Image (spheres, rainbow, N blue to C red):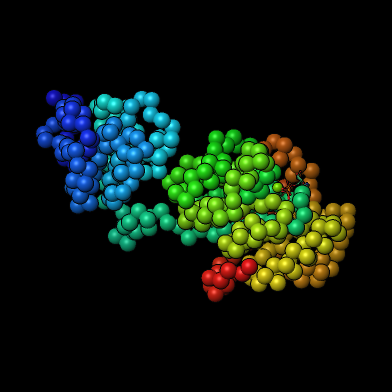
Amino acid sequence: MSNRFASEGVAIVDGDEGFLAESKQLFDGDVFTTTFAQEAVDLAARSEVEVIFWGPSFATSAGLLSIETYDVNPDVVMVLVAPVNIDNDVLRRAIRTGFRDIVEEPLQPDAVSSALEQASRLMQHRASAAPAAPTTPERVTRRDGKLITVMAAKGGSGKTVVATNVATLLARWSEPGTVAMVDANLQFGDVALVLQVDPKQTIVNAAKEGEGLDAGFLATVLTDHPSGLKIMAAPLEPAFADEVPTPTLTHILDLMKGMFDYVVVDTAPALDDRLLAVLERSEQVLFVVDMDLPSIKNAKLALETLRILNFPSNAIRIVLNRSNSKARLDMGEIERSLRFEISGSIPSDGLLPASINEGVPIVDGHPKSKPAKAFEEIAKLVLSADTPVADSNRKRRWF
Ligand SMILES: Nc1ncnc2c1ncn2[C@@H]1O[C@H](COP(=O)(O)OP(=O)(O)OP(=O)(O)O)[C@@H](O)[C@H]1O
Ligand SMILES: [Mg+2]
């Protein structure tokens, strides 16, 4: 029959012989079917199978758990054949288990067709890979990303404005999907608002996965921005911040460093344990100082604290905000007081609050404006910096 599929490279696994017999009808020849998962897993390990259809008896939490205990060749396209009313938790678990496709039972020709197309694309991709290209999926996806933390010692200094604009520029200058942003202002984060995206999931969804959180699930929690930036949104309500304890936040950041080239972190205005844990993982810190005396006083105290904690000072760049403000403080005096050079300065400009209200970063909405040019300089600094923190420092916990 013309609408039957070649059986080569396909395995169907289920506990129900009836399901196997019915599914077999869709294939020409003798497709491999088994009630013993290990048999299919072994064939996959030898690359004799490229697609495994797991039948409905695996479409439960226990069934998926049993699949997780097998070491299934990650190159195999896994398709779950599940009942229409599959439970949401089971669905999420299936995604985490590595299923590319979840189709309704019974197995239908179009589901078979799309799974086989996926497998064939995968094969072509592998065949066209350069010889020197990484061979294991771990190495294909594993990145050695840089964490850029934007902090300030006082609220309202301009952290979010700096973080969103710098992240947007990095995303614009990079391959799509290689730059991410994390809103680690867990109580009052407004990155999603400022970038006018509507997160369906937030960092709370990631935190709920607990120990089992992995890159695959984390990717499903991120929100897309038109620039190509991937956003990990803050909790929707301040009370939910407690659901993201510091070890969970750091686990998320570590995973994201493995998924992206640059991860820009916006923070809350508090030098607390959470911020210190984020800083410990940061390759670079953009320290925003507003051009007023209380802000400079707080910055001086915070920088002293970081010095006492042995945080490597060459990782810190001072960004002076509202540099043309009426305060008219002398730049040299500020530098002497902070014992740091000023690496970038952003003028005060009414376009900035307007850009926040519009939900369009100023680097997109007014790319020729002075603040946009200032953000470009800062983003270039981020790009040009080698990993400034000495290896010895990175290996050591400094608080
Ligand atoms: N250079 C600037 N010129 C004009 N307005 C600015 C400038 N920088 C920041 N603002 C405005 O100041 C306000 C605070 O900025 P932002 O939200 O970035 O600060 P923040 O440090 O993230 O605050 P929070 O501590 O509450 O998170 C915003 O309304 C923003 O538009
Ligand atoms: Mg903010």
Q: Position of residue 388 (x, y in %)?
A: 59, 69
> As displayed, is residue 217 above or below residue 332?
above
Asked whether 345 or 32 is in front, the reply is 32
Vertical placement of 280 versus 210: above or below?
Answer: below
Residue at the image point whose x is 61% and y is 69% from the top: 398
Q: Is residue 10 visible?
A: no
Q: How many marks?
A: 0
Q: Is 207 in front, or is 257?
A: 207
On the picture, is 62 further left or further right than 26?
A: right
Question: In the rendering, at what x and y percent does residue 133 appear?
Answer: 34, 59
Query: In which quadrant is the N terminus drawn?
Result: top left
Residue drawn at 25 percent across, 41 percent down: 51
Q: Residue furthest left?
A: 29
- Observer-nearest residue: 18 or 352? 18
Query: Which residue is depicted at the point 34% across and 39% down?
Result: 62
Vertical side of 313 occupied by 132: above or below: above
Residue at screen point 63% across, 50% down? 184
Where residue 295 appears, as percent x and y from the top left, is 81, 57
Residue at the bottom extreme, as displayed: 392
Q: Is residue 40 above or below residue 397?
A: above
Frontmost residue, 213 versus 365: 213
Q: Which quadrant of the figure contains the C terminus?
A: bottom right
- Using the rendered image of the protein, determine whether residue 306 is visible from the camera's viewpoint: yes
